[in-house]
Amino acid sequence: MMSVVGQAAVLVVFPVVAAGAGAFAGALRRPSPKFTSGVQHLAAGVVFAAVATEVLPELKAQGHLWATAVGFSAGVAVLLMLAAYTRRLEATTAAPETTGDSPAQSTAAAPTARLPVGLLVAVGIDLLLDGLLVGLGVTLGSNQGLILTVALTLEILFLGLAVCAELLELGIARFRAASVAASLALATALGAIGGAAVLGDASPTVLAAVLAFGAAALLYLVVEELIVEAHEQPDTPVLSALFFLGFIALFLLAEVGG
C-alpha cells in the first residue's frame, strides 16, 4: 500500500497542474468577468461542501474540543493577518509614484516592471496552507484527501488565473507572468508532502488542532474571498445556481467515495 506521503504526492499533482493551466490560460486570453464570477461561485460551493461534509464531521467525531477551539482561533488570526498584509501590498502597488513621466514613458517602462515580491510571498503562503490541507486530508484517510484535493484544485485554478492577471496589469510580460504564477503552485506541493510527512505520526489532539485551523482557512476562503469577488459582477440566477451545483456535486462525490 502506498504511504501517506506517496498519496499526498500523487494527489497534489492535480492542483499544481490546475494552477499552471489557469496561469497560462489567463496569459493567452483573459476570461470575461462573468466567466470568472461563475468559476468563483462554483469553487465556493465545492469548498463549502468540503468543510460541511468532511472537515466539520471529522472534528466532531474526534471530540477534542479545546484543540479544535485553539486551532480554529489560530487559523482565523493567521488568515486575517495575511489578508491585511495582502491588502496593504495591493494598495501600495496600486498607488503609482507621482513623477514627471509622460504616459508614453510609463508604457515604455512596462516591460521592465519588477515583480511584486511581497504579494507573491503572501500568495505562496496561502498556497502552502492549501497544500497542508491536502496532506492532512491524506493523513485522515484517502477519501478525505480526495475530497479536499478536488475542492482545492478548483480554488487554485482560479488563483493561478488571478495572479497571472495581476502580474499582467503591472506590465510583466505574458510568458513571465504565467510562469511565475504557475511556479507558485510548488508551494502547494511542498505543503502537501511536508504536511503528510510531519502529521503522519501526529497525535489525535494535534490532528484536531490542525484540522480546525484548516476549517477556518477554508471558511475564510469561501466567505471573504471567493463569494466577495464573485459578487463584484451583477448576480444572476445562473451564477447563483453554480454555487449550489458545486456544493451538491462534491457532496455526492463524498457519499459515493465513502
Image (cartoon, helix red, strand yellow):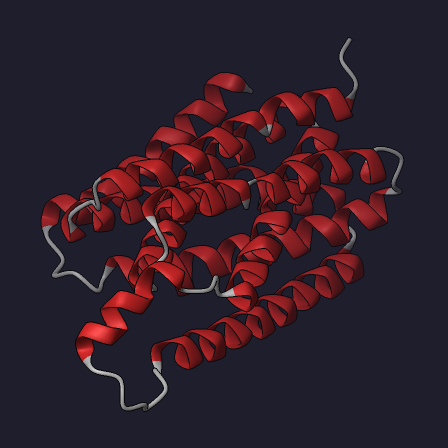
Residue 64 left/right relative to 211: right
- Count of numbered marks: 0
Find residue 71 and report its image quarter.
bottom right
Q: Residue at x 68, y 27 (%)?
A: 8
Residue 212 left/right relative to 2: left
> Between residues 257 and 201, which one lies in front from this camera angle?
201
Query: In the rendering, at what x and y percent does residue 61 appear?
Result: 70, 41
Tell me the quarter of the image containing the N terminus: top right
> Between residues 109 and 41, which one lies in front from this camera angle?
109
Q: Residue at x 57, y 69 (%)?
A: 82
Q: Residue at x 55, y 75 (%)?
A: 85
> Between residues 190 and 139, which one lies in front from this camera angle?
190
Residue 107 left/right relative to 15: left
Query: In the rendering, at what x and y percent does residue 97 appear?
Result: 37, 86
Tell me the quarter of the image containing the C terminus: top right
Find residue 62 and report its image quarter.
top right
The answer, for residue 118, to whether it is visible in the render is yes
> Between residues 116 and 156, which one lies in front from this camera angle?
116
In the rendered image of this protein, does residue 1 appear above or below residue 221? above
Name the outermost residue toward the top.
1
Q: Residue at x 89, y 35 (%)?
A: 201
Query: In the rendering, at what x and y percent does residue 239 appear?
Result: 17, 47
In the rendered image of this protein, does residue 226 appear above or below residue 161? below
Query: In the rendering, at what x and y percent does residue 187 appear?
Result: 63, 44
Residue 171 left/right relative to 149: left
The answer, for residue 46, to whether it is visible in the render is no
